Amino acid sequence: MKPSFAPALNPCAPLADAGPDVRQRTAWGMIALFCVLWSSAFAAAKVALEDCPPLILLTLRFLAAGSMMMVMAAATGGLKGGLRSIGWRDFGCLTVLGLCNNALYLGLSWIGMTTVSSAFTAVLISTNPLLTGLLAGPVLGERLGWRQYVGLCLGLAGVALVLRSRFVGMHEDPHGALLVAGGLLGLVAGTLLYKRMAPKTTIWVTTGVQALAGGVLLLPFAVHYESLRHVHPTASLFWNMAYIVVGVSIGGYALWITILKRQSATSASSLHFLMPPLGLFFGWLILREPVSWLDMAGIVPIGLGIWLATRRAV
């Protein structure tokens, strides 16, 4: 049986895992919207980084998005009883997830993206399903079937083709690539920790506390290593910041938490195999980053790998 994605959850209700035998209609619209938001964020961030240093930009993004989401949580009844209603355990879990999913993942990958292309960043981050799938067994006890193993290998092969294309002629900076790889490890850790820790909070509280935690954790580094003198308040920075905060931090992360809560870690993270073709497309469309025939060839095994890796283990 194929795993399925549930329609958007009630934002006032605590998130709860769907049982293994629950059959629900696949919300392809929600999946498609998440993939577009997530993959386009790399190109939008690359444009914004031209006018603002990465840590300052991320700190402002997280604090703004987190504050807005906590207001939404209060407005929808997710904070009845105030912050005490979250509980120390869940608050601690969300703070750790904010460190992994926001501060480490985006902090390192955005710093790396100052010297590598947005398309390369999207492709490298898309290897999340492989690492998550390999670790989901020993960490979460998830059983992978032969379809998932084949799908993960095909997806990795496609990603490898694109990465090879990008490194030929040293078009990408190795130091920047290492930073993006460090961000990838943060995302993998956040994915596995969320499935294992499973905080019992609403969507807006879950995403809001993580964003605020990420902003607070990045703030001292932004103040120490960067300067407001390097921020140029242009219209381009404003609109890209608005898109990243509202579209990606609020909309994209809410969709991701909904998908992750209803799927196995392996199946949910396999959506990241869609990021290479979409990342290449947005990099070409917005930034005019070149796309080679090897880039295009890598899309075929990636697409087949998605179809296989997201099937339930048999």
Image: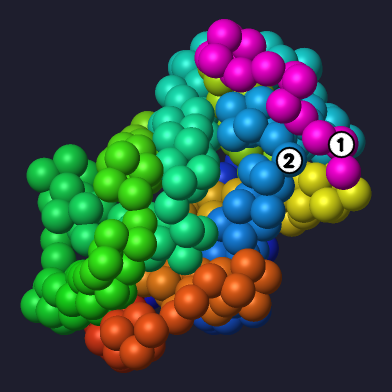
For the N terminus, the image quarter is bottom left
Q: Residue at x 43, y 52 (%)?
A: 116
Q: Which residue is mark 1?
A: 233
Compared across the picture, whether 254 is left or right of 235 comes to left
Specify the amino acid type for callout 2: Asp
Residue 265: tell me if it is visible. Answer: no
Q: Is residue 30 shown in magenta?
A: no
Specify the amino acid type for callout 1: Pro
Please say if 169 is above or below 234.
below
For the C terminus, the image quarter is bottom left
Compared across the picture, whether 164 is left or right of 186 comes to left
Q: Which residue is mark 2?
A: 51
Q: Nearer the viewer, residue 8 or 80?
A: 8
Q: Nearer the viewer, residue 216 or 146?
A: 216
How many neighbours does mark 1 have within 10 angstroms: few (below 14), some (14-19), or many (20 or more)? few
Check whether the beta carbons of the residues at disc 2 and disc 1 lie within 8 A of each other.
yes
Number of numbered discs visible in the structure rendering: 2
